[in-house]
Image (cartoon, grey):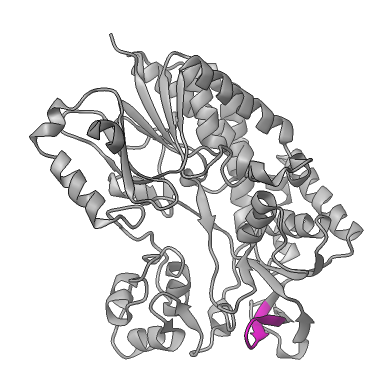
Amino acid sequence: MSEPRLAVIGAGPAGLAATLAAAARGVHVTLVDSAAEAGGQFYRQPAPGLGARRPQALHHQWRTWERLRDGLRTHVRAGAVRHLTDHHVWFVERPDTGGFTVHALVGPGQEEAAEVRADAVLLATGGYEKVLPFPGWTLPGVVTAGGAQAMLKGGLVLPGRTAVVAGTGPLLLPVATGLAAAGARVAALVDSADPASFLRRSRALAGRPDKVAEGARYAGQLLRHRVRTLLRHTVVEALGTERLEAVTIAALDRDGRVRPDTRRRLDCDTLAVSHGMLPHTDLADALGCRLDGTDVHVDAEQRTDVPGLWAAGETTGIGGSALSLAEGHIAGRSIAARLAGRTPDPHEWTPAARTREKLRSFFTAVDSGYALPAHRAEQVTDETVVCRCEEVSAGAVREAVRELGAGDLRTVKLLTRAGMGWCQGRVCGPGVAEVAGCAETPGRRPFARPVPLGVLARAGEAAGPARAAAPEEPQDDAQRDQ
């Protein structure tokens, strides 16, 4: 009997935990990831050529990362895991012959194709930032909070000398403290969250005292670096001519509207902004998975409703690295049992299941505390560009709703071209929905990323009779051509 094969897409906390759990139980794992090194966004590492002396200074939970890294290396050396780096997955196929075929583009140019065949697939594709539009948000110097963190962790560079960190969500805390510790002057952390909303949820938050203590540590670091924390405030406008020079901030009233009498200017050359996170669901959606709102639906074993397909980590709901590790571990054990033809025993992962349930409850309370102001769209002027790719303004979106009767994102897209550009609505979709007053729904896209026509043509040729006779061992195009 051939060794069962699992393809894990994504080498962040969830993907690594699942890989180690499955490989330790006799499953051959192919770990497919778009980055040059494992770790995902959370454990992003500086490039080796930079010669970082103390990369652990940019991270917490470093010992957890070391265990994951060392475990992966051990399984790779033993031949139980094949780690494919710089592989950008654009589609997962379910051939009539059974199993799955993972299609990827290879390398920085993403012009060469590769395929991985597997009996089961785990989606550990993580999440991405949501940034909503406001006047001036397209100025050079305005970056996402996660982008600023990635520059620091991966490139050991600061996005600017004087920064304002703004928006809402738990990501703002580590970004502000990380920039300050690295030498940037953080003029302020501007968060629209209302402190009273967290007090109302104190019982749910108290269920994870470790996370509360983590937040307190961040608060202490902000005080040590003399970073002003302005809660129930928002950035009204980014100011500058050729690039960012300052931001205008203001307090919010109880209804979430800007209080004009509180406007003030903060000089800065960098604005790191984030309005929360969204799960990456393109691959799951293309495979026909059920979505619960923006999250991939899974059962207690992390199985989706597509046979042979599991999902873990941020793609099933935003909840941080500890939750991703727990879900990945459960998924890896479940997959190993199912591929061996037996029903898993949930008692085997009881500690991970307890962690998962507590953290899901905790982050449900956190998310509600960080809810966006109800009237935030009023800050977006008609002249503000909401879709950068197609240069669609907020006024054009409002006109499509008011004058042309658009009532959903698809109709707005057809009437204005908002979301028809390179990002296909991944970046601008939430902002367009906010301005239009539509429900924020994941866009259905056949592919997870742009694909060269030559790659599509070759994939179409391979889908013919020759595919049934293809070798069992995963091979990329270069190997097949030899």
Quick one: 322 or 45, which is closer to the camera?
45
Q: Nearer the viewer, residue 482 or 336?
A: 482
Picture layout, residue 274 above or below residue 324: below
Query: In this image, 27 relative to 93: left or right?
Result: right
425 and 481: which one is in front?
Answer: 481
Taking depth in this image into account, of 208 and 34 the one nearest to the observer is 34
Residue 82 falls in image quadrant: top left
Image coordinates of residue 95 in percent, x first then y, are: 19, 35
Residue stretch rendered in magenta on the structure:
235-246
Residue furthest to the top = 1
Residue at x 16% of width, y 46% of height: 460
Instruction: Examine the rendered structure and indicate whether residue 310 appears above or below residue 318.
Output: above
Quadrant of residue 136 within the rendered picture: bottom right
Which residue in the rendered view is the most extreme toward the left?
A: 465
Task: Answer left or right for 394 relative to 156.
Answer: left
Is residue 45 something that shows in the picture?
A: no
| Membership of 141 in magenta stretch | no
Q: Main secondary structure of the magenta part?
A: strand
- Looking at the rendering, which quadrant does residue 102 occupy? top left
Determine the residue positioned at 22% across, 24% down: 471
From what the image shows, is residue 25 above or below residue 374?
above
Image location of residue 312, percent across then percent down? 48, 37
Tell me if residue 5 comes above or below residue 247 in the rendering. above
**380 horizontally vs 265: left or right:** left
Q: Position of residue 335 (x, y in %)?
A: 41, 23
Residue at 71% x, 40% y is 208
